[in-house]
Amino acid sequence: MNDLRDVFKLSVAERIQLVGDLWDSIAADIAEVPLTDAQKIEIDRRLAEHDADPSTALDWSVVRAELWSRAKAK
């Protein structure tokens, strides 16, 4: 891909995969992304909420499978 316009020529499934790949590359370098105090507070709040009731969380593989099935259905 030499041009950003090429991204929009990809299928929905390919664009979802691209977003996932981009996110994975960002997550690998997450230490380079500074957080504001407000973001840190929100992360702590969400972690506390999850710790209080972990049953409300969905595994990433479940979420991803659902996204893929929706993309393929179109």
Image (cartoon, grey):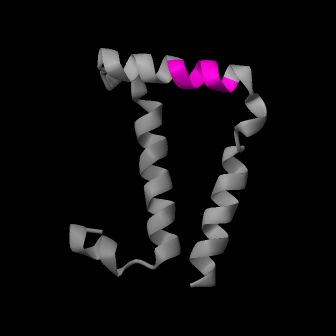
* Residue 74 location (% of width, % of height): 56, 85
Seen at 32% across and 26% down, the residue is 33
Based on the displayed image, in which of its 4 quarters is residue 67 positioned?
A: bottom right
Nearer to me, 49 or 60? 49
Nearer to me, 35 or 32? 35
Q: Is residue 59 magenta?
A: no
* 67, above or below 20, in the image: below
Nearer to me, 54 or 6? 54
Seen at 43% across and 41% down, the residue is 25
* 58, above or below 37, in the image: below
* Residue 43 location (% of width, % of height): 48, 23
Q: Is residue 29 left or right of residue 4?
A: right
Q: Is residue 46 magenta?
A: yes
Based on the displayed image, in which of its 4 quarters is residue 55 positioned?
A: top right
Q: Which is the main secondary structure of the residues drawn in magenta?
A: helix
Based on the displayed image, in which of its 4 quarters is residue 50 positioned?
A: top right
User: What's drawn in magenta, residue-wise?
Assistant: 45-50
* Residue 8 location (% of width, % of height): 31, 76
* 49, above or below 74, in the image: above
Seen at 51% across and 62% down, the residue is 17
* Residue 65 location (% of width, % of height): 69, 61
Q: Is residue 47 left or right of residue 52?
A: left
Screen quadrant of the N terminus:
bottom left
